[in-house]
Amino acid sequence: GAGVSQSPRYKVAKRGQDVALRCDPISGHVSLFWYQQALGQGPEFLTYFQNEAQLDKSGLPSDRFFAERPEGSVSTLKIQRTQQEDSAVYLCASSSTSALSSYNEQFFGPGTRLTVL
Amino acid sequence: QKEVEQNSGPLSVPEGAIASLNCTYSDRGSQSFFWYRQYSGKSPELIMFIYSNGDKEDGRFTAQLNKASQYVSLLIRDSQPSDSATYLCAVRNTGNQFYFGTGTSLTVIP
């Protein structure tokens, strides 16, 4: 694969529905990040994986948000009982290096635009 | 206080001029600093990173870092209309967390 891919690109959910957003990182990339970007704002960090280990989930806004990367490649961000304030673009990024290295270039996917009605 | 602050703009410069984008950060121990460009409706793409005090040049782009002042900037020389985008400053802090600013919107006028 040439880059990070995400699916679906667009998702409309009714309030209270559960959604699952998928991220396929660049092959071999050890680090994977999820961000939430509201309109007119910069990306806000949600969580970080190094291989299959979720090393930081401090940015997840509530216990309705859950992320996993069971085999160290594909990751899924799940949002339970969606609320209108969850409407945003969810960006996934991957990097060939650990977040602990001085240089950590993150390659972003196209994002999933979630709209909660 | 936000971790990373940027002027939201919009910043307008004529074609061929120098565009100067600024960013301040709150965690004095922050280690790495990044500038991303984001076109409308697209995902961010990395332009430059810097982690040592001073200047770093890459083509038309120069990143400047002053850790004492907790300030990082991006200069774009010979600005082109294709440089029109939102520029995001990102910082990796002492906790190895990444924070982005809200971005500065740049318009280069032909």
Image (tube, coloured by chain):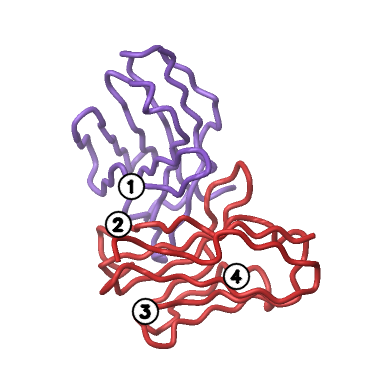
Chain colours: A red, B purple
Asked if residue A35 lies left or right of residue B98, the reply is right
Secondary element under disc 2, as helix, strand or loop, is loop
Residue A60, disc: 4
Q: Are marks 4 and 1 on the same chain?
A: no
Name which residue type carries label 3.
Ser
Residue A23 place in picture, x, y as percent: 46, 70
Chain where mark 4 sits: A
Residue wearing tag 3: A73
Disc nearest the viewer among 4 and 1 = 1
Disc 3, SS: loop
User: Tag 4 or tag 3, which sits nearer the N-term?
Assistant: 4
Is B26 left or right of B94, judged from the image as shown? Answer: right
**Foreground: disc 1 or disc 3:** 3
Q: CA distance from mark 2 to mark 3?
A: 17 Å
Do marks 2 and 3 both belong to one polypeptide chain?
A: yes
Q: Nearer the viewer, residue B61 or A10?
A: A10
Q: Indicate whether B82 appears above or below B31.
A: above
Kind of residue at badge 1: Leu
Say which residue label 2 marks.
A105
Residue B46, disc = 1
The answer to whether dots 3 and 4 both sit on one chain is yes
Camera-nearest label, 2 or 3: 3
Q: Residue at x 33, y 60 (%)?
A: A3
